[in-house]
Amino acid sequence: MKAILPIIAAFLATSAAFAAEKETTLTGEGKCLKCALKKADKCQNVLEVKKDDKVTLYKLVGDVSTKFHGELCGENKKITVTGKVEKKGETTEFAVSKIELAK
């Protein structure tokens, strides 16, 4: 029995790490953190997702998001993003692998 415990622990740790790596797709209001929300010194894409009475703001990061910024700077638009979510302190970052205007 004692020989099996380390194997089970390793499996659970690997499974948790794999789950954290899973991509997520979210739809919400795309905005510029500087121009629309006045919360930054430089332009940055964010995704605002409203569910019930809760609003979650995701800071969109990566080259895919940067290239899409022209669509959001100056005008909020409904967008769909796919990528990996990571909590960094009080900020929730979304490493974007795909971004498009919502249909």
Image: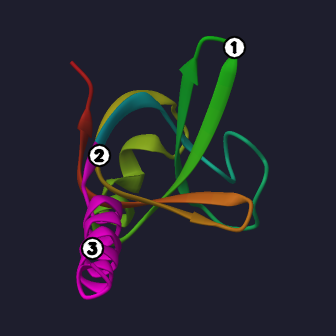
Instruction: Give left or right: position of 81 versus 94.
Output: left
Could you say which quadrant of the image residue 8 lies in?
A: bottom left
Task: State yes or no: discs 3 and 2 in contact (Cβ < 8 Å).
Answer: no
Name which of mark 1 and mark 2 comes first in the sequence.
Answer: 2
- x then y, percent, for residue 17: 33, 71
Could you say which quadrant of the image residue 14 lies in?
A: bottom left
For disc 2, the neighbor class at 10 Å (few under 14, some 14 to 19, many from 20) is some
**Which residue is located at x 67 percent, y 47 percent?**
35
The local secondary structure at tag 2 comes to strand
Residue for badge 3: 8
- The amino acid sitting under disc 1 is Asp
Residue range corresponding to the magenta coloring? 1-24
Q: Quadrant of the N terminus?
A: bottom left
Residue 79 versus residue 94: which sits nearer the camera?
Answer: 94
Residue 24's label in the rendered image is 2
Task: State yes or no: discs 1 and 2 in contact (Cβ < 8 Å).
Answer: no
Whole-angstrom CA distance, mark 1 to mark 2, is: 21 Å
- x then y, percent, for residue 83: 29, 55
Residue for badge 1: 53
Q: Quadrant of the C terminus?
A: top left
Residue 26 versus residue 22: which sits nearer the camera?
Answer: 22
Whole-angstrom CA distance, mark 3 to mark 1, is: 40 Å
- The amino acid sitting under disc 2 is Thr
The chief SS type of the magenta part is: helix
Q: Assess whether residue 62 is covered by the magenta stretch.
A: no
- Please name which of the two marks, 3 or 2, marks the residue nearer to the observer: 3
Residue 61 versus residue 92: which sits nearer the camera?
Answer: 92
